[in-house]
Image: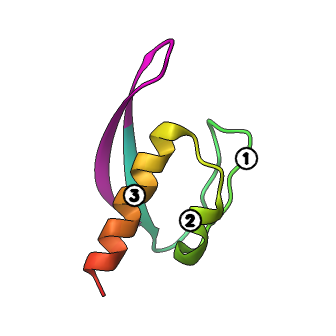
Amino acid sequence: MFSIMNLRVEYDYPNFHLDMDCYWATVVSGKLTLLEHEAARWVPFEDLETVDWLPADKLVVEKILDYKASRL
């Protein structure tokens, strides 16, 4: 069981345009299964800016940090 908040990100890479739906989910119970990516890891809020994100992912991280700051 989980709850979800949706975020759409668009980014123009040199060779293609990315239109990505992102979901902020809270796991309430059960176990997540990784289906589409080779690797995943949980990153605490305070460590988000230490990861070498791809450009489109940086937009998502900015939104997450803005949301966190608005909740303080």
Q: Where does residue 68 sit, x and y in percent of width and height?
A: 36, 75
Residue 61 versus residue 17 in the image, above or below: below
Kindly report the distance in space between the C-alpha atoms of the residues bearing marks 3 and 2.
9 Å
Q: Considering depth in this image, is 17 or 25 the residue closer to the camera?
A: 17
Residue 63 versus residue 55 in the image, above or below: below
Label 2: how many residues lie within 10 Å, few (<14), some (14-19) or many (20+)?
A: some
Q: Earlier in the sequence, mark 3 or mark 2?
A: 2
Q: Earlier in the sequence, mark 1 or mark 2?
A: 1
Residue found 56% across the figure and 77% down from its top: 46
Kindly report the distance in space between the C-alpha atoms of the residues bearing marks 1 and 3.
22 Å
Residue 62 marker: 3
Residue bounds of the magenta highlight: 1-20
Answer whether residue 1 is visible to the viewer in this image.
no
Residue found 65% across the figure and 47% down from its top: 34
Residue found 51% across the figure and 39% down from its top: 55
Q: Amino acid at mark 1?
A: Ala
| Mark 3 vs 2: CB contact within 8 A | no
Residue 65 versus residue 72 in the image, above or below: above
Which residue matches tag 2?
A: 48
Label 1: how many residues lie within 10 Å, few (<14), some (14-19) or many (20+)?
A: few
Residue 68 marker: none
Which residue matches tag 1?
A: 39
Q: Amino acid at mark 2?
A: Leu
| Mark 1 vs 3: CB contact within 8 A | no
From this viewpoint, which residue is outermost toward the left?
A: 70
Q: Where does residue 69 sit, x and y in percent of width and height?
A: 33, 77
